[in-house]
Image (cartoon, helix red, strand yellow):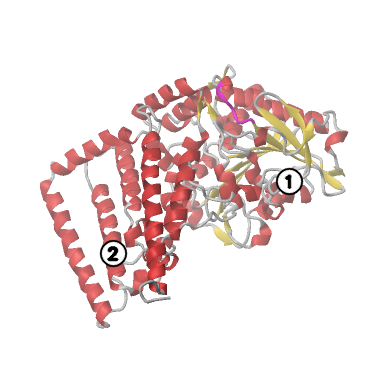
């Protein structure tokens, strides 16, 4: 081979790199076309133009106080100078070794060592953290905004600063640059393929869903479907003990997601664990509705759903009463149902457990930024056309509550680094979204979130009965989670001042899902207990004792003496109801259209 035709390893690498970059350019053009085809409609319930008025009002308030605006600008320039001096000193080995601005503990965006060790990336990181905090602080300090507008501005400002993190961009993420160099751009090709795939499916891939097929890897606790109607199937789980507590346990999960969050893999299934503790467990598996169920209301979920499930559970076991569990909106429904039953003197529910369930929506968290008169009007228009609120849109809204963890981290991993999604059961479940009937969703948003009518005596009428949750005297176990972005724990605590029966409040570590799905063997998260129930949640926490390990054992200890004597185990095929099919049934497998 002559020198003219010889090709060294560097030349070969450059040729591969150039070839890969041509593929990146081609896929980028395809990506732009796909993106433009999928722009949101003007009446989208998450239409970004819905926040225009809030930021217009913010701007007017800021301009009205020019001195404060100038002072804020002078402050940020002074701080930039300090950051630059700090970076220069650290690079030269002189002066202090700590950064002038440090990321919050647990901020995984800047875990790569280059963010600390390389002068350029150190400066980028500190400048970004300084600017983002300054911007949020400046917005928060603007006077004259009403609380709803302030919350909306704060939320979308946070969305903006999260999106603009240097970790989210190819040229300013050291790990991405290093990976691109080492792989000769293969990561970007894979990443663009992932992005095109996700645009087609309409959501970010967070986990390998195939690794957690329903009925094969998750939702595999043995049981039978013993009842069904148009809204739900009822699962009766097979016992794993020779004897069980007499009083059955009925679980009412949220219909915003599928029930099997409480029956994931055997090692973290709350259902399997409760069955092993000697409880006869029944589970409501809600249907994934389509437009044919557009007129199904919140009231129907109570009458055709919860009440019918109570009746079927009692028929299956031959008992006269039961214990009930309501999770998230399933707990909100349970509170309304208990109030309805209190008006009628119906005592078929002996004890109630509420898992991260809102009843008082005064402080309902960041989700309220999507709920005001303007956006509800847009929502009604959308629901009138579709008949359902699509599950993927609901998932987008919830993901925005934790954008760095549930959006941007996957943008970096999937699209910039080109990595394949890892198998994670909770994320696979999170992606298995469900639709919501139009009538129910509109009622729920207006009456609960927007007007907080559930805590008003007679504020809501269900099935012809004006209800008052203050009349609920059923013994209650109330669980909240400390980092919950969907049902803030302080708001969950407010229920202790509403019900006038026996109450126990427990606060678990972590969030809305991970704090609930916390098996004892994991040893992962602890919880707080306090026998006293002062009026204010902060007073409760100040007097609480932190306990190691899962709240599951505390709950089982509370439930056992309230579940009756032990009786021979009851199997699904032995009761008054006959098995329709094996669990997990057809309804949970129905995908959103």
The residue segment tinted magenta is 287-291
Q: Going 44% across and 63% down the picture, which residue do you hit?
A: 106
Q: Residues within 10 Å of mark 1 (few under 14, many from 20)?
A: some
Query: Is the residue 67 above or below the residue 440 in the image?
Result: below
Nearest to the observer: residue 349 or residue 167: 167
Nearest to the observer: residue 286 or residue 586: 586
Q: Residues within 10 Å of mark 2 (few under 14, many from 20)?
A: some
Q: Quadrant of residue 169?
A: bottom left
Q: Return the residue at label 2.
A: 124
Residue 586 picture location, percent across and down: 70, 33
Look at the numbered disc 2 and give the secondary structure of its residue: helix
* Count of numbered labels shown in the rendering: 2
Residue 472 is a magenta residue: no
Query: Is the residue 300 above or below the residue 474 in the image?
Result: above
Q: For residue 362, say whether it is visible.
A: yes
Q: Going 41% across and 42% down the picture, which residue do you hit?
A: 366
Residue 15 picture location, percent across and down: 39, 64
Question: If the image is split into quadrants, where does the C terminus sit?
Answer: top right
Q: Going 16% across and 61% down the picture, which residue do you hit?
A: 77
Q: Return the residue at label 1.
A: 220
Nearest to the observer: residue 78 or residue 525: 78
Residue furthest top in the image: 464
Residue furthest front in the image: 2
Say left or right for 95 vs 459: left
The mark that comes first in sequence, 2 or 1, is 2
């Amino acid at each position: 081979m002559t020198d003219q035709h010889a090709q060294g390893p560097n030349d070969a690498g450059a040729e591969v790199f150039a070839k890969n970059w041509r593929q990146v350019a081609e896929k980028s053009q395809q990506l732009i076309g796909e993106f433009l085809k999928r722009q949101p409609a003007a009446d989208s319930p998450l239409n970004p133009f819905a926040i225009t008025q809030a930021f217009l009002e913010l701007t007017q308030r800021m301009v009205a106080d020019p001195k404060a605006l100038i002072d804020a600008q002078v402050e940020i320039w002074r701080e930039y100078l300090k950051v630059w001096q700090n970076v220069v000193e650290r690079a030269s080995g002189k002066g202090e070794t700590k950064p002038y601005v440090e990321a919050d503990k647990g901020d995984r965006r800047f875990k790569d060592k280059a963010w600390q060790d390389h002068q350029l990336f150190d400066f980028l990181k500190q400048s970004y953290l300084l600017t983002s905090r300054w911007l949020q602080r400046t917005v928060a300090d603007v006077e004259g905004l009403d609380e709803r507008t302030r919350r909306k501005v704060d939320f979308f400002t946070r969305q903006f600063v999260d999106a603009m993190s240097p970790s989210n961009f190819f040229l300013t993420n050291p790990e991405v640059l290093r990976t691109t160099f080492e792989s000769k751009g293969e990561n970007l090709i894979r990443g663009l393929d992932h992005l095109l795939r996700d645009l087609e499916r309409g959501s970010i891939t967070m986990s390998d869903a195939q690794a957690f097929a329903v009925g094969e890897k998750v939702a595999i606790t043995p049981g039978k479907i013993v009842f069904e109607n148009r809204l739900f199937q009822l699962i009766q789980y097979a016992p794993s003990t020779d004897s069980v507590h007499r009083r059955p346990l009925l679980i009412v999960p949220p219909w915003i997601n599928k029930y099997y969050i409480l029956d994931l893999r055997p090692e973290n299934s709350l259902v399997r664990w409760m069955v092993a503790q000697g409880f006869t467990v029944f589970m409501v598996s809600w249907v994934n509705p389509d437009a044919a169920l557009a007129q199904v209301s919140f009231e129907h979920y109570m009458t055709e759903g919860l009440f019918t499930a109570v009746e079927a559970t009692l028929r299956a076991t031959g008992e006269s009463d039961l214990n009930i569990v309501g999770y998230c909106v399933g707990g909100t429904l349970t509170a309304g149902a208990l109030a309805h039953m209190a008006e009628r003197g119906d005592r078929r529910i002996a004890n109630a457990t509420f898992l991260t369930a809102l009843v008082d929506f005064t402080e309902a968290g960041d989700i309220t930024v999507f709920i005001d008169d303007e956006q509800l009007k847009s929502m009604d228009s959308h629901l009138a056309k579709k008949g359902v609120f699509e599950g993927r849109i609901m998932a987008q809204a919830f993901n925005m509550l934790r954008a760095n963890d549930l959006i941007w981290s996957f943008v970096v991993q999937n699209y910039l680094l080109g990595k394949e999604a890892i198998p994670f059961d909770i994320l696979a479940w999170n992606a298995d979204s469900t639709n919501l009937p139009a009538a129910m969703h509109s009622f729920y948003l207006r009456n609960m979130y927007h007007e907080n009518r559930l805590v008003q005596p007679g504020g809501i009428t269900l099935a012809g009965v004006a209800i008052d949750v203050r009349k609920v005297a059923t013994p209650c176990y109330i669980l909240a989670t400390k980092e919950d972005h969907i049902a803030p724990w302080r708001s969950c605590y407010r229920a202790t001042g509403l019900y006038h029966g026996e109450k126990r409040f427990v606060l678990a570590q972590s969030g809305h899902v991970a704090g609930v799905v916390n098996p004892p063997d994991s040893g992962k998260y602890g919880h707080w207990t306090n026998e006293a129930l002062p009026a204010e949640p902060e007073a409760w926490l100040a007097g609480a004792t932190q306990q190691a390990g899962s709240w599951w054992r505390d709950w089982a200890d509370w439930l056992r003496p309230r579940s009756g004597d032990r009786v021979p185990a009851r199997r699904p095929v032995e009761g008054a109801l006959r098995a329709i099919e094996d669990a997990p049934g057809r309804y949970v497998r129905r995908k959103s259209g």
